[in-house]
Image (cartoon, rainbow, N blue to C red):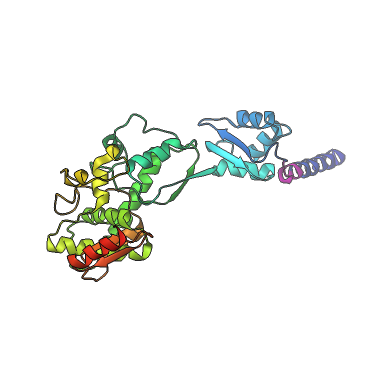
Amino acid sequence: MRRFFTFLVLLAVLAGAALGYYAYRPLPLPVTPFEFELKQGSSLKGTARSMQQAGLLPQDWTFVWLVRLLGKSAQLKAGSYALTHPVSPLELAQIITRGDVRLSQVSIIEGWTFRQLRAALDASPDITHNTGGLSDAEILQRIGAAESHPEGLFFPDTYKFAAGSSDLTILGNAYQTMQQRLEEAWVARDPGLPLQTPYQALILASIVEKETGTASDRTMIAGVFVNRLRKGMLLQTDPTVIYGLGEKFDGNLRKRDLQADNPYNTYTRAGLTPTPIALPGVAALQAALHPAQTDALYFVARGDGSSYFSSSLAEHNRAVNQYQK
């Protein structure tokens, strides 16, 4: 009996050593990166078999035993995974039970329209496209937005997500981020602005975003528009007219376009446009709510991205002759 007991102890030690050697020995990757996907409801045995067939595991049963010994056989997380360097079976078990899925990213750019944003999401192969066939209003409803028009509601940034995430999830994150950033900026706004609501600030910020060619001019441009709003002057800004033209705009803004009335023509209608005209970034939001203290009422593009600002129409006309004609 003593010899038999000693044999069992020795066998257990050897088995433990073998398991430890297996658990900590790095697995060479068949390809780099090694990508695989665990579907919802995948079993441990099926997962191990797939990895063995793909060349990652030398055999499947040892990995199954390891995960069961860890008590994690029911904790597999569905998702897309990517291994960029060799990992041990123990590390692999931790990866698929923690859900360390492969992250993709998409960038939302300042100045984009919602149509451009939808096109960018549709073009990403890493996104599950659940918005196909949905109207803009239906998308807003799906993400819980209170607004009826989507323009300007999504914060420009780079968003990381698990491969296979829904475009509705990404849009929802961008919407909530914009709501948060807008509320923070609104609370800290300068006093006495001719803006009644955060949404009006968003509209003004979108116009500032589209008019700014050089970052250093941004607060001055906002200052001009704020001055015009205070005086009841028409904003007379080309980007709003272009937005109102939509797909009819061919790149050439004509005099008849400036004279054709529509809700976004700030040459024919006073005040702000009904909605934002683009996605404003945080700098445009800050400029709209903290505009430059200036008496300027006009500005004209110099041709190098910067603008010349004037406080009188006569000075503005001279600047137009100098820089535009």
Q: Nearer the viewer, residue 294 or 35?
A: 294
Q: Is-magenta flag for residue 25?
A: yes
Q: Residue at x 73, y 40 (%)?
A: 28
Q: In the image, residue 313 lies at what x, y percent?
A: 18, 65
Q: Is residue 288 visible?
A: no
Q: Residue at x 64, y 41 (%)?
A: 33
Q: Nearer the viewer, residue 225 or 153?
A: 225
Q: Is residue 13 left or right of residue 83?
A: right
Q: In the image, residue 195 lies at what x, y percent?
A: 18, 59
Q: In the image, residue 24 lies at what x, y percent?
A: 72, 46
Q: Is residue 244 visible?
A: yes
Q: Is residue 173 left or right of residue 56?
A: left
Quarter holding the N terminus is: top right
Tell me the magenta residue range.
20-27
Q: Nearer the viewer, residue 22 or 30?
A: 30
Q: Is residue 58 left or right of residue 325?
A: right
Q: In the image, residue 271 lies at what x, y percent?
A: 15, 54
Q: Is-magenta flag for residue 73?
A: no
Q: Quadrant of residue 119?
A: top left
Quarter holding the C terminus is: bottom left
Q: Quadrant of residue 236?
A: bottom left
Q: Residue at x 81, y 42 (%)?
A: 14
Say if 127 sits above or below 292 in the image: above
Q: Nearer the viewer, residue 121 or 43?
A: 121
Say if 89 sits above or below 216 in the image: above
Q: Is residue 182 left or right of residue 32?
A: left
